[in-house]
Image: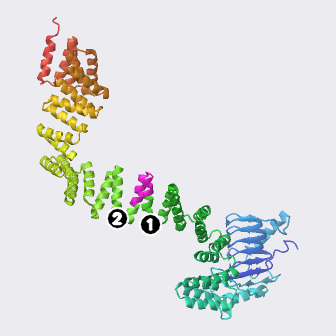
């Protein structure tokens, strides 16, 4: 008989039918209803648009218009038509996928079976067969059955684990449909989870199993055990009650009895991945590592995506110190579920032990995303990033940790210090203010807050912070000195002096206070008092170039030029590149009329700082006084004016140089410019008069 002659439906299951069990058929069958179980067919099996199968199918050919959730093994062909869906793996000789059909899984092509080698005949066959999957199956179009079929054999009531029962019914055509309907839908509720042949006769192991599971979940172990025992009395080959019993014995701590029950599950459901996982866990807990390894491997063999089994394998490889396999199993878990916290935590510990900071940071970053509320993970990640000098990254996770523990003052202090180091003053201020609000600030936090306020010129805020610091600890010299600095900036000189003196009572050698109080006395022209404090500084710290330099400046103002020269020489001996000290020497030697010594020191200033306009002008003036290097002096003078134009003193120096050189007209010219800038300057008037008298008479 040709395929064309054979294209008639032998059996039809309508849209309202819901079958549970294994459906074995002969002839062409179309299912528009639902089936929870397996399909075995020696001919073409057609799943209509409303059809849905949850289970594997082993057929000659499958034409799918509906939804299949399971693996397909077809000797000849599989065709997925428009709008259909298949979630599972396909093994067939020929696969056709039409537009807008969805397929999620793997396809394995196998050698063709006893199919036609005539492609044209095959196409006609699928075309005619395809019509059988879409045409109406009303009374007028329903073909008369031509073959017997084996009706659904209910090998157990299929719950989540897929139970099996061993009984069969052989019915024919429409009588089969009626009998199946009587068994499964006699109650009138076609969506009901209860039913089956046992329900028909008043016994339902499915209800007993459901009751047992409910009792188990509520902790009523003995009552649950009784329900599972009743289910086994009805059907000894149904693995679900054995599974329930095994879990009960686990709850009771009887691992040996649990093992026996789980082994019965394996006998009746060898493809159940969870039973192997449980066996692996029990053997591992009993210390039978090799047996645990076998069972976990069985679990992933049945279901490669069984994450708990991979986790179990990783634990075994860790125990056996098989590092490569240990890491591989964890990476497999993360490839399936990147957010698996157990695998991430195990890998994190592994990388920590290995000293692999780069991967440790990578894993921790993932972990804080998975478990955003884990304070310790944020803190550890921040510390690692800080160790790697990624300060910006570190402070990000410190901040996240601080939000999880708002009252953690120690952490807020840590973050504040980081912000200070990063010179993010505004953020540091907010953090210290937070510490104050939490009443966790000691004198040092108030001191630091005061420093930040002072830096931002918030003098009132700084004063308040420093006073709080002193209130908490009045014996800290730095706090009193800091308060003095604020008061000095606020022009409260008496208050500042009082703070400095308090500082020195606490620590007579506190150099910042000695410098500050000497500055105040210099500003008040109390040079004698200023010198006494500066001398005290150099006695305490003989390597303070700044103190010697400041002492030299003060001696010049007194004036005590010999003492000034001595102080400046001490400064340059400590800091040979300090142009200010050399400039001070130049000025002091000029006052002592030691012009050659002054010229030498001014030249040193220009050597260190070529554009030092004061030194350029002073050296030019010295050349005019010594009547030497006049052209060079004129060049220095002109450069000083370029650096600081229209400076009367610099114009006077240039006019003096031209006068000394005999170029009187130029001397008069620049002298007049100087006087024009300062018209009341008596010295400039005298200079102009001197130069004018020297003009040649005409």
Identify the secondary structure beneath mark 1. Answer: loop
Note whether residue 202 is visible.
yes
Determine whether, in the image, residue 166 is placed left or right of residue 331: right
Residues in magenta?
383-399
Query: Would residue 588 be found to the left or right of residue 293 on screen?
Result: left
Residue sitting nearer the eye, 90 or 544: 544
Between the residue at mark 1 and the residue at mark 2, the CA separation in whole angstroms equals 14 Å
Q: Which mark is residue 607?
A: none
Quarter of image, res 606: top left
Q: Quadrant of the N terminus?
A: bottom right
Q: Residue at x 24, y 23 (%)?
A: 617
Residue 644 makes an appearance in the image: no
Question: In the image, what residue occupies the spot 80% across and 78% down?
Answer: 27
Q: In the rendered structure, find residue 374 and report the number of the disc placed on it.
A: 1
Q: Overall secondary structure of the magenta stretch? A: helix
Q: Which badge, 1 or 2, is on the more N-terminal residue?
A: 1
State yes or no: residue 198 in magenta: no
Is 634 on the left-hand or right-hand side of 359? Answer: left
Residue of label 2: 408
- Dot 2 lies on which element? loop
Residue sitting at 21 percent across and 21 percent down? 651
**Contact (Cβ within 8 Å) of mark 1 with mark 2:** no
**In this view of the protein, which residue sits in the foreground, 512 or 693?**
512
Badge 2 density bin: few <14, some 14–19, many ≥20, Cα 10 Å: some
Residue 659: x and y, percent?
A: 20, 14
Q: Nearer the viewer, residue 209 or 481?
A: 481
Give residue 171's position: percent from left, percent from top. Answer: 78, 87
Judged from this view, the residue extending furthest toward the bottom is: 202
Q: Quadrant of residue 415?
A: bottom left
Which x, y percent locates residue 263? 67, 81
Residue 533 position in % (x across, y down):
16, 41
């Amino acid at each position: 008989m040709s395929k064309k002659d054979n294209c008639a439906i032998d059996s039809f299951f309508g849209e309202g039918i819901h079958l549970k069990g294994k459906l074995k058929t002969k002839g062409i069958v179309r299912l528009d209803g639902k089936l929870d179980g397996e399909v075995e067919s020696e001919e073409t099996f057609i799943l209509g648009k409303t059809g849905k199968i949850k289970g594997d199918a082993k057929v000659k050919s499958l034409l799918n218009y509906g939804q299949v959730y399971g693996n397909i093994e077809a000797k000849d062909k599989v065709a997925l038509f428009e709008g259909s869906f298949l979630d599972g793996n396909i093994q067939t000789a020929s696969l056709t996928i039409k537009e807008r059909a969805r397929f999620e899984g793997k396809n394995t092509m196998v050698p063709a079976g006893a199919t036609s080698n005539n492609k044209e005949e095959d196409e006609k066959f699928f075309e005619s067969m395809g019509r059988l999957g879409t045409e109406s199956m009303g009374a007028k179009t329903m073909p008369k059955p031509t073959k017997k079929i084996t009706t659904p054999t209910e090998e157990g009531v299929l719950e989540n684990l897929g139970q099996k029962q061993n009984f069969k019914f052989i019915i024919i055509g429409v009588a089969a449909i009626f009998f199946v309907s009587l068994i499964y839908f006699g109650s009138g509720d076609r969506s009901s989870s209860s039913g089956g042949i046992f329900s028909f006769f008043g016994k339902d192991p499915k209800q007993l199993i459901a009751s047992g599971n409910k009792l188990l979940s509520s902790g009523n172990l003995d009552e649950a055990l009784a329900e599972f025992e009743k289910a086994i009395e009805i059907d000894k080959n149904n693995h679900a009650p054995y599974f329930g019993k095994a879990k009960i014995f686990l709850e009771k701590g009887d691992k040996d009895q649990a093992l026996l029950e789980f082994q019965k599950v394996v006998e009746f459901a060898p493809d159940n991945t969870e039973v192997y996982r449980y066996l692996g866990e029990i053997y591992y807990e009993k210390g039978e590592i090799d047996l645990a390894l076998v069972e976990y491997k069985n679990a992933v063999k049945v279901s490669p995506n069984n994450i708990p089994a991979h986790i179990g394998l990783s634990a075994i490889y860790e125990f056996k110190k098989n590092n490569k396999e240990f890491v591989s199993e964890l990476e497999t878990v993360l490839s399936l579920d990147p957010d698996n916290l157990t695998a991430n935590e195990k890998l994190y510990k592994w990388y920590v032990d290995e000293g692999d900071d780069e991967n440790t940071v990578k894993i921790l970053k993932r972990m804080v995303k998975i478990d955003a509320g884990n304070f310790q993970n944020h803190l550890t990640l921040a510390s690692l990033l800080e160790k790697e000098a990624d300060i910006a990254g570190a402070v990000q996770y410190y901040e996240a940790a601080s939000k999880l523990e708002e009252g953690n003052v120690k952490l807020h202090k840590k973050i504040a210090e980081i912000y200070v180091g990063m010179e993010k003053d505004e953020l540091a201020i907010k953090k210290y203010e937070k510490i104050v609000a939490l009443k966790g600030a000691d004198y040092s936090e108030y001191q630091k807050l005061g420093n930040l306020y002072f830096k931002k010129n918030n003098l009132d805020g700084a004063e308040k912070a420093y006073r709080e610091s002193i209130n908490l600890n009045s014996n800290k010299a730095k706090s009193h000195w800091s308060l003095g600095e604020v008061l000095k900036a606020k022009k409260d000189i008496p208050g500042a002096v009082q703070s400095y003196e308090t500082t020195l009572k606490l620590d007579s050698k506190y150099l910042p206070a000695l410098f500050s109080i000497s500055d105040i006395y210099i500003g008040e022209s109390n040079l004698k008092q200023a010198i006494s404090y500066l001398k005290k500084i150099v006695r305490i710290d003989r390597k303070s170039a700044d103190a010697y330099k400041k002492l030299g400046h003060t001696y010049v103002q007194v004036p005590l030029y010999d003492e000034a020269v001595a102080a400046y020489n001490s400064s340059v001996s400590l800091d040979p590149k300090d142009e200010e000290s050399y400039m001070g020497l130049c000025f002091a030697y000029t006052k002592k009329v030691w012009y050659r010594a002054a010229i030498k020191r001014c030249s040193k200033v220009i050597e260190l700082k070529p554009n030092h306009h004061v030194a350029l002008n002073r050296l030019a003036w010295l050349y005019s006084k010594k009547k030497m290097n006049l052209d060079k002096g004129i060049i220095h003078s002109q450069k000083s004016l370029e650096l600081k134009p229209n400076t009367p003193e610099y114009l006077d120096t240039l006019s003096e140089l031209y006068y000394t050189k005999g170029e009187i007209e130029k001397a008069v010219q620049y002298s007049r410019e100087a006087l024009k800038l300062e018209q009341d300057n008596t010295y400039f008037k005298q200079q102009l008069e001197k130069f004018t008298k020297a003009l040649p008479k005409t």
